[in-house]
Amino acid sequence: MAKAAKKTNDKTVTVEQTGSPIRRPQDQRATLVGLGLNKVGRRRTLTDTPAVRGMIAKVAHLVRVVDEV
C-alpha cells in the first residue's frame, strides 16, 4: 500500500493580479505564470509556503494578497 502524503501546511493564500506584465522583465512574467496568473483580475488560491511567498514578494507590484487562511 502506498503511504498517504503528509499534510505539512494547510494554510492558503489567495492572490489577484492587478498589473500587466507588459514591459516587464522576463523573470517577472515567468513568476506570474508560476503563480498561475496571466491576465489582470485573475485570482488563484495557493498553499502558503516560503516559496510561494517569495514569488509573491518578487512581483508584489503586480499582485495583491486578497485572503490568507
Image (spheres, rainbow, N blue to C red):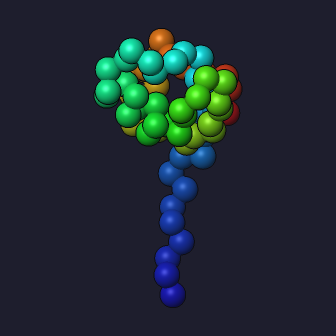
Query: Of 43 and 39, which appears nearest the observer?
Result: 39
In the image, what residue occupies the spot 51% across and 87% down? Answer: 1
Quarter of the image where one finds residue 51: top left
Residue 69 against residue 63 in the figure, above or below: below
Q: Quadrant of the C terminus?
A: top right
Return the x and y of residue 62 as percentages of the image width and height.
50, 17
* Residue 15 seen by the camera: no
Where residue 23 sits: x, y (%)? 39, 15
Q: Residue at point 31% right, 28% down?
A: 27
Residue 4 relative to residue 30: left or right: right
Give the number of marks. Answer: 0
Q: Quadrant of residue 31?
A: top left
Q: Residue at x 49, y 76 (%)?
A: 3
For the question of whether residue 36 can be seen, the reply is yes
- Indicate the position of residue 55 as horizontal and vertical percent values: 41, 29
Which of the two residues, 52 or 61, is positioned nearer the viewer here?
61
Q: Is residue 58 above or below residue 47?
A: above
- Give the side of residue 31 with respect to residue 26, left or right: right
**Residue 37's quadrant in the figure?**
top right
- Residue that sits furthest to the front in the current view: 22
Residue closest to the eye, 55 or 41 = 41
Q: Position of residue 44 (x, y in %)?
A: 62, 36
In this view, which residue lies farthest toward the top? 61
Residue sticking out furthest to the bottom: 1
Identify the residue shown where x is 48% and y is 12%: 61
